[in-house]
Image: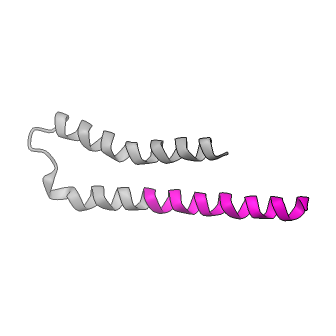
Amino acid sequence: MRRSLLLLLVLLLSTPVTLVAQLEETTPGGLRAYWHVFISYVLVWLFIGGWLVMIARKLGRVGRDLEG
């Protein structure tokens, strides 16, 4: 369970970096004026990742309570 959460977190965090790197190579002028959009994108993914971790922890507690 923790391995899958770690993999999900790594994938979520690497996606914005990959997108920004690809955009800088393909556009001649770059997108420096839109840096706030990329920061917002990263923050949203971090919030979603934190939410998923919170849900996984709560489900783990519920499972332990049901077992014992």
Q: Quadrant of the C terminus?
A: bottom right
Q: Which residue sits at x=61%, y=42%? A: 4
State the image coordinates of residue 31 (x, y, percent, origin top left). 16, 49
Q: Residue furthest front?
A: 68
Q: Which residue sits at x=70%, y=64%? A: 58
- The rendered magenta stretch, by its main secondary structure, is classed as helix
Coloration of the structure image: one colour
Q: Is residue 63 magenta?
A: yes
Is 63 placed above or below 21 here? below
Q: Nearer the viewer, residue 66 or 51?
A: 66
Q: Is residue 54 left or right of residue 23?
A: right
Q: What range of the chain is rendered magenta?
A: 45-68
Q: Nearer the viewer, residue 37 or 62?
A: 62
Q: Is residue 16 left or right of residue 20?
A: right
Q: Is residue 46 magenta?
A: yes
Q: Which residue sits at x=26%, y=44%? A: 20
Q: Is residue 59 left or right of residue 5?
A: right
